[in-house]
Image (cartoon, coloured by chain):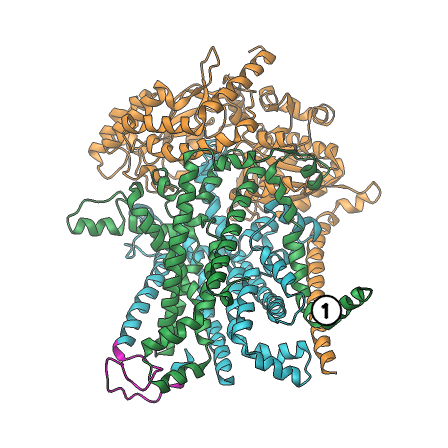
Amino acid sequence: MENSVISRQPASRPDKRAKKTRDFHRLSPFWNAAAHLVIGLFSLACVYPFLFVVVISLTDEKTLALNGYSIFPEKWSFQAYQYIFQTGDQLLRSYGVTILITVVGTLLTVAIVSLYAYAISRPYFKFRGLFSFIAFFTMLFGGGLVPSYIVVSQVLHLKDTIWALILPMSVSAFSILIMRTFFKTMVPDAIIESGKIDGAGEFRVFLYLILPISLPGLATIGLFAALGYWNDWFNALLYIDNAKLLPLQSLLMKIETNIQFILQNSAIGSGTDRSAIAQSMPAETTRMAMVVLATLPIIFAYPFFQRYFVQGLTIGSVKE
Amino acid sequence: MEHGPMRWLRTLNRNKALLLMVLPGTVWFILFCYLPMPGAVIAFKDYRYDTDGFLASILRSDWVGFKNFEYLFKTEDAFIIVRNTLLYNAVFIVLGTVLSVLVAILVNEIASKKMAKIYQTGMFLPHFLSWVIVSYFVFSFLSVDKGVLNQVLKFFGADPVFWYSETKYWPYILVIVNLWKGVGYGSVVYLAAIVGIDKSYFEAAMIDGASKWQQIRKIMIPMITPIIVIMFILAIGGIFRADFGLFYQVPRDTGALYPVTNVIDTFVYRGLKVTGDIGMSTAAGLYQSVVGFVLVIATNFIVRKINKEQALF
Amino acid sequence: MKKRRGLTLLLSLFLLTSMALAGCGSKDNGGSDTAGTKTDSTGSEAKSTEKEKPVKLIWYTISGPQKDQDKVMAEVNKYVGEKINAEIDLRLIDWGDYSQKMQVIAASGEPFDIAFTSSWAFNYVESARKGYFYELDGLLEKYGQGITKALNPAFLEGSKVNGHNYAIPTNKELPAQAVWRFNKVLVDKYKLDVTKATTLESLEPMLKTVKDNEPDVYPIPSNIGPYLPYDFALEGLPVGVSIDTKDFKVVNVWDTPEAKQVFDTMHKYYKAGYLPPDAATKQGNEHEKTGKWLVDKQHTVPFADILWSDSLGYPIVSSPIHEPMVFNWSVTGSMQAISAKSKHPEKAMEFLNLLNTDAYLRNLVNYGLEGVHYKKLSEDTYEPIPDSGYSMPSFTLGNMFLLYKLKEDPKDKWEQYEKFNSSATNAPLLGFQFDPTNVLTEIANVKNAVDEYGPSLNTGSVDPNKVLPKAIEKLKAQGIDKIIAECQKQLDEWRAQNNK
């Protein structure tokens, strides 16, 4: 992306077909427009459902039941949002939990993963093979749900703590793999050698020479990790009983699964019990409003993330 | 020979910095992966609970051999679910990779940095919507009486289509929905790889008078090929695991569509709904792992034959 | 030098992380601990210092989260501490999560004392058979006399697994009775006679009247499920015996004339437009909100029409399809079990006994604090305070007959329940619990086939003349005959043992 930044100024382009143009950093206007069109349409298609969800959340409950989903509802209503803000200190709490686990978890993941990946990317590391195996073998085999649950709840005693939402996902062999390849291919050996000659220790080389030029890689695994933490609901399902520690996605997921469970399970109590439970569930517009409120921060946070992302990349290129 | 242990210690000492680096990760792997791993033997046992705890329960349960795996192989459905899982995932991997790389290149080439950012944010959004929400959205298109598509058909005087009972459309629908949800997210890796390419290559190409297209083909793609290959090999490892939400929520668990929507994960879910047997669910997981493992080894072997540099291990 | 600095940096980083880990961990633990002590420090602790320390019981039950849980539990523990020197650690798990979570908790051997179990969530028979639950026969005799007295004996009798009780059933409606439930607005408008509604076929003239006059209403709004006069051996599979069977012959229910007739009729209705075109895949209950429906099928309880009218906001009337009948699944519809691993099974039983016999405790656990969560109107009536932060699902906890009534409720509500309970006859398989161990493979396969064909046959979306033979063939290919044979074998043994 930043190559386009660097090459902002020169814009002389005599040949429209761009076959022999001198400026290789920019596309011809035609292809540029085509790229805009393709990517623009695709991203529009990606945003559209979200708009759709916003519209449903603003539709009058009764209108929704009568007419079904429509992008131009007959009657609008803010009732869903009113309802959430009246009763929803849970939503606010869950925001807090999600943000906390995302921030702490991402930092932890990036730290552990980059250290591990760096070590196994060094050709002179004697135990490289062993530790690569230790990491990558886990991508293929798992012990299953119950044994993992026992480790977290009974060995580490993490149940109903915030750490049960962070630690089980804090390392991924997948990210280690990406970072290892990154270090291997993107970090010139010359840099490490120069560091070595200066007499810098391994950690020093890593911290002051490698990390700064590895920001694109770090940003990538950081982003993956952050999204993983933000979207996780399964760990909460397993390890969290206390509503005060429920993350956002788990809150949303719970509402969906509850409603499906009640509607599909005809054996629950009598018909009257079922009606009573169904009554206590949030209405569809309310559910959509919660989706909107849960997704909105990401839309605003992502550009920031992206800025660091791009910044990291720029630093990388300046070094060259 | 008596220097053996001493030498080993010296090796340790020489590598101590790097060993310290892998320490936290190794501790994590031991705790969260290797400690639970022996639990997989449940797949070969008739799991019976014992009040002395989980370990005792495993030890005292009877061995049943491959009985827990039988339901995955016994009927002709087993063939269908394996076929569906493999074919869908193969299509997802191929098209997903191609489109992700394409999107990454296009985003990288777009001159307006601001627009590129906006597009990227937009493409990311579907990743945050759960499959349940996506299924509502798909339903708003495909619903028989109120769906957008049928209204369009009606407008043109065509007969409405019963989308949720016609199997022939679903392979396309599922592929489109999956790509739509995943491509924006998938392109991030490739974008990072592209931006990470040493600028001097492009400068050299520029001096040689290479066109943009040539730059993409001759520099960009070869440079990101290692990442593509790695992602590909990894995806192969998961080819036996289907995205449950996509195949269960999006077709609204419609029976008539099972021939084209039933995959291993949904089959196991439905099959064990009645009895909830731990042995059988562990068996399914193990089956998926082992096949994935074999496929990864095989793919890696082939890649290695072609180009040793690009192999995963 | 430099090397060491790098190392120190890293080490301090680790120290920091581990400290943060430990710190936060202990903070969290501290948090829950203080919450725990808060609950008992209010009252029982002062007294219990003289006595021995109260026994702590962990109780998992199914419910949405309750905002004021801590407040109410403080009061509960004060009372329970005094009465039986116990302290309850109540943990609520949401509806959709309950089964999965409890299965993991139980299978992993995590400690708990009491847990909700039933035929539809955290399956009772399965769990009892897997050994998760404490066998209660002795405890019931010793500490559960109150329960035995309060319960209709059919509850304990019908919920035995291999001859033993593993959970305490809730005293509520014992039998199940399917009814046609009508939207009374339309019934009155078109002067329909719902008393004539008995069989599926008898609905036809009413469906026709409504469809003719209100073309945009689908009289049957969704997949209402067929009523088939069979007692099923396993939830969700078409394997069972006829409800008035004499020979106890286990059959493939889809392969019976009754099923064929239901599917045929539904197909006729579907073609006539009485069901929505996408009935087979329709989810949700929008029609209940819009009132655009005439009839569906539900299980009733005494005064159900009043409750339904109340919760839907328009009048409802219903007409029975069959006489009330006690099924395995209705008996085990809501129970509380004690963990096989519980360290205090006696205390747990004492508590359950108290919960099922003590009106004050039962209402406290259910409705919360008087004046805060509900207003007491008289000796046995109450009025909930809306959005007050505490109201538990009453049918899941224990003896319902102890509960205060709404002022709209008839005075003799619980008497009517008892009458309803004693009016019922027993279904043929009551007390017989099918053990699926030997046919798990077939069950998993057959279930997939049932899910594939069930909804479209049940809603008449497909022509049974074409599809039903295919479906039956598929069930056979998946091994339903083996399940039937296994079931028949077990049933015959059970009959020999129980002289049925």
Residue A291 placement, left or right of A241: left
- Percent x, y of residue B233: 48, 59
**In the figure, A69 relative to C146: above or below?**
below
The answer to whether B226 is drawn above or below residue B263 in the figure is below
The residue positioned farthest toward the front in the image shown: B1
Q: Which chain is orange?
A: C
Residue nearer the viewer, A204 or B6 = B6
Where disc 1 sits, the SS reads helix
Which residue is most to the left?
A: B157
Taking the magenta stretch, the answer to whether it contains residue A16 is: yes
Residue B154, image x, y percentages = 18, 48
Q: Residue at x 46, y 38 (%)?
A: B270
Q: Position of residue A211 (x, y in %)?
A: 58, 76
Q: Taking the image as drawn, is residue B64 in sight? A: yes
Chain letter behind tag 1: C
Name the residue located 40 percent from the left edge and 76 percent from the top edge: B219
**What kind of residue is marked 1?**
Leu
For this rendering, which residue is in front, B98 or C379?
A: B98
| The image quarter in which residue C396 lies | top right
Residue at (25% x, 27% y) in the render: C268
Chain letter, cyan: A
Q: A6 or B88: which is nearer to us?
A: B88
The chain assigned the colour green in the figure is: B
Q: Tell me: residue C337, above or below residue B125.
A: above
Left or right of C317: which side holds C116?
Answer: right
The N terminus of chain A sits in image quarter: bottom left
What residue is shown with label 1?
C15
Question: Nearest the camera: A154 or A177?
Answer: A177
- Bounds of the magenta segment: A6-30
Predominant SS along the magenta part:
loop
> Is residue C381 shown to the viewer in this render?
no
